[in-house]
Amino acid sequence: MKHAIILAIVAVCGLTGCNTAKPKPLMTTQGAPSPNDLVATMSYPTCRTPPDRPGDYRYSGGPGDRPETAIAIEGSLNEPTGVSAEFAYVARHLPGWQICSQALLIPGRRVYDRLDLANGVGDRRAIYFDITPWFGKL
């Protein structure tokens, strides 16, 4: 499981440009789920505008303001396309918001990605995606 988590983080880095000359994100992994079920986090030195990845993504679920109302991405996905769909969601549905960090949460049988966002006036919020169907699929 720990290897799958690290592979997931590496896949995200490859998609988001972590391997460019930009400052690298700070990654933290936990050996076992912490009390709040946080398994891994990735914080960026500065918040960044997500690229609108091409694709005809379909979303369902709730507004994503907490794990219980997480946004689900429809279709047959793997980690690279799933992460692209997450970034496209922010770019298309939350213009003006930037991603400041990501966290992987496993509170039982479901797996969630939490994106911590900020906008230009200093507001902050988090959105949750249910990534259970495609987590660990490369």
Image (spheres, rainbow, N blue to C red):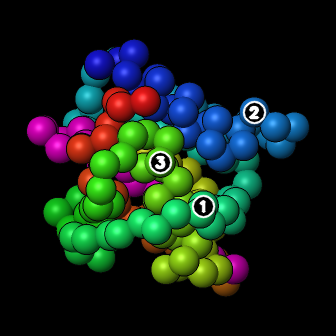
Magenta residues span 104-120
- Amino acid under disc 1: Arg
Query: Going by the image, does 106 lie left or right of 42?
Result: left
Look at the numbered discs 3 and 1 and tell me whether their residues touch, using CB distance below 8 Å.
Answer: no
The label shown at residue 81 is 3
Q: Amino acid at mark 3?
A: Thr
Q: Position of residue 21 (x, y in %)?
A: 87, 37
Report how far apart the C-alphas of labels 2 and 1 lie in the structure: 18 Å
Residue 124 picture location, percent across and down:
52, 72
- Residue type at mark 2 is Asn
Q: Secondary structure at mark 2?
A: loop
The answer to which of marks 2 and 1 sits earlier in the sequence is: 2
The residue at the point 12 percent across, 38 percent down is 108
Q: Examine the rendered structure and indicate whether residue 43 appears above or below residue 100.
A: above
Identify the image quadrant of residue 87.
bottom right
User: Against 93, is 72 above or below?
Assistant: above
Q: In whole angstroms, how far apart are the C-alphas of marks 3 and 1?
A: 9 Å
Q: Earlier in the sequence, mark 3 or mark 2?
A: 2
- Neighbor class of circle 3 (other Cα within 10 Å; few <14, some 14-19, many 20+) is some
On the image, which quarter does residue 59 sit in? bottom left
Indicate the secondary structure of the residue bearing disc 3: helix
| Residue topped by disc 2 | 19
Disc 1 marks which residue?
53
Rendered position, 110 above or below 124: above
Q: Nearer the viewer, mark 3 or mark 2?
A: 3
Q: Nearer the viewer, residue 58 or 71?
A: 58
- The answer to whether the residues at label 2 and label 1 have Cβ atoms under 8 Å apart is no
What residue sits 64% from the left and 80% below the top? Answer: 96
